[in-house]
Image (tube, helix red, strand yellow):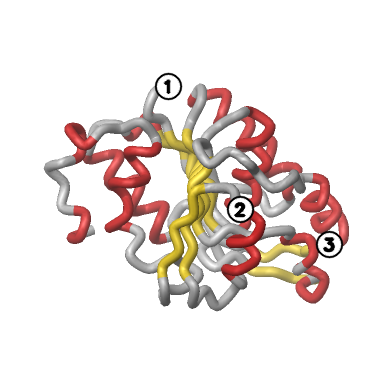
Amino acid sequence: MSGSILYIHGFNSAPSSKKACQLVGVMDRLGLGDQLQVPALHHHPREAIGQLEQAIARLGRPLLVGSSLGGYYATHLAERHGLKALLINPAVSPHRMFDGYLGTQKNLYTEETWELTHDHVTALAELEVSAPQDPERFQVWLQTADETLDYRLAQQYYRACALRIQAGGDHSFQGFAGQLPALLSFAGIGPDVYQAIDFTAL
């Protein structure tokens, strides 16, 4: 489906996150709501990847938009399927970071509690791929004041890709709505479709 988008939320996040809602709102206003999927991902990586594979099958060849841990998932899937990916403050090698987080977790949006186990960490490690080398297929958006992830890890890992690094910001990526035209263009949705929208008002 030309112009289709699969949004992949991050760790302990949900489709009700601000970025996801802004993207849903814009696609609905453009009459393209059926070309966007924002699945509520299972906390276990193997389950989540299965959900995402199903969404890719429904959408055809979507642009993968991944935030944080979703960026890690998007990288794996983009390399597996030869898809384009736009990564927002993506996690790099998240399995190396989770040792101190084992135990009870709580989703920030749904209030669901669950147990982060060694099997989660193993499953994450299984998804690791070599650093992408194709700048045509990847855009990586980073903000330097990300309080959760060190942006320099992603800057190094994705150094062969198209990097957009903004000073300041935070892990949620401040000013995301204002960058949506670039996202839509990367997905193959032209300015003639969205030029009437004031993205600064979102």
Q: Earlier in the sequence, mark 3 or mark 2?
A: 3
Could you tell me which residue is drawn at 27 percent across and 39 percent down?
28
Name the quadrant of the N terminus: top left
114 vs 61: above or below: below
In this picture, residue 95 sits left or right of residue 156: right
In this picture, residue 200 sits left or right of residue 38: left
Query: Residue 32's image quarter?
Result: top left
Could you tell me which residue is drawn at 49 percent across and 55 percent down?
163
- Amino acid type at mark 3: Thr
- Location of mark 1 (residue): 1
Q: Nearer the viewer, mark 1 or mark 3?
A: 1
Assign a secondary structure to mark 1: loop
- Amino acid type at mark 1: Met
- Location of mark 3 (residue): 117
Residue sitting at the far front = 160
Tag shown at residue 158: 2
Q: State yes or no: discs 1 and 3 in contact (Cβ < 8 Å).
A: no
Q: Position of residue 88 (x, y in %)?
A: 50, 56
184 vs 69: above or below: above
147 vs 83: above or below: below
- Amino acid type at mark 2: Tyr
Q: CA distance from mark 2 to mark 1?
A: 27 Å
